[in-house]
Amino acid sequence: MDKREYHRLYELAHKKELKEYRRRWHLKNRTRQYENNKKWIKDHREQYLQRRKEYRLRKLAEDPNRERKYKPQKHEYGQRVKREVFSHYGKKCFCCGETNMAFLTIDHINNDGHKLKNPGNKRKYVGLILYLWLRKHGYPNDVRIACFNCNIARQNNEGKVCPHLSKS
């Protein structure tokens, strides 16, 4: 019996104990493991993306309805996080009082939303990614809720004031 066969038989005979050992080891070393994974992904970006793509294609081949099954769950999670964030900030436009969630968005009070993007990070902080970031950082006070009209009008207006507020 060669070494590989011995290890395979040992794994089969001690499946429960090995599973428990690996679980405990992971709990004890999760931070180190997370950092190592992050470093490996950074160092091997192309290989990582290729593996992800292959995995996704393999899973789709196994179950063609896979994406259709999980998309509603992902959408519901995003909506739940959005409701949570908007509940914290007041669920209405600071300017015109619009309350329809379909029209509301996050407004950076100091027009500094672009500063969230790190120079080495290509990720844009919009939508769910922004909502998760806000939640993770304890709902900072430099953002508020605005409807799309007021948010865009404020960006385009020279005085950085919404036309609703500058009428008076």
Image (tube, rainbow, N blue to C red):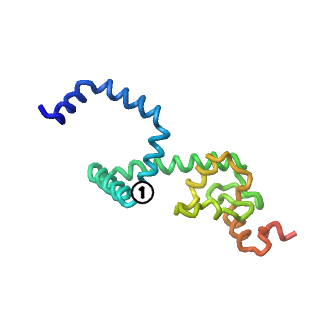
Q: Can you say whether 84 is above or below 110 in the image? A: above
The mark tally for this picture is 1
User: In the image, residue 100 lies at what x, y percent?
Assistant: 66, 56
In the picture of the structure, the residue carrying the numbered disc 1 is: 43
**Relative image position of residue 62 (x, y in whole percent):** 27, 49
Q: Amino acid at mark 1?
A: Asp
Task: Give the left or right position of residue 78, taking residue 142 as reference.
Answer: left
In which quadrant will I find the C terminus? bottom right
Q: Is residue 87 left or right of residue 37?
A: right
* Residue drawn at x 21%, y 32% as measured from the top left: 7
Q: Is residue 9 above or below residue 78?
A: above
Horizontal and vertical percent position of residue 68 = 38, 52
List the single residue furthest toward the left.
1
38 over 120 or under it: above or below: above
Q: Residues within 10 Å of mark 1 (few under 14, many from 20)?
A: few
The answer to whether 155 appears left or right of 133 in the picture is: right
Which residue is most to the front? 3
Pick whichever, 62 or 11, lies toward us: 11
Q: Residue at x 34, y 54 (%)?
A: 56
Taking depth in this image into account, of 112 and 82 the one nearest to the observer is 112
Q: Position of residue 125 (x, y in %)?
A: 58, 59
Where on the picture, by quarter, is residue 13? top left
Locate the N terminus by quadrant.
top left
Tell which residue pokes out farthest to the right in this image. 168
SS assignment at label 1: helix
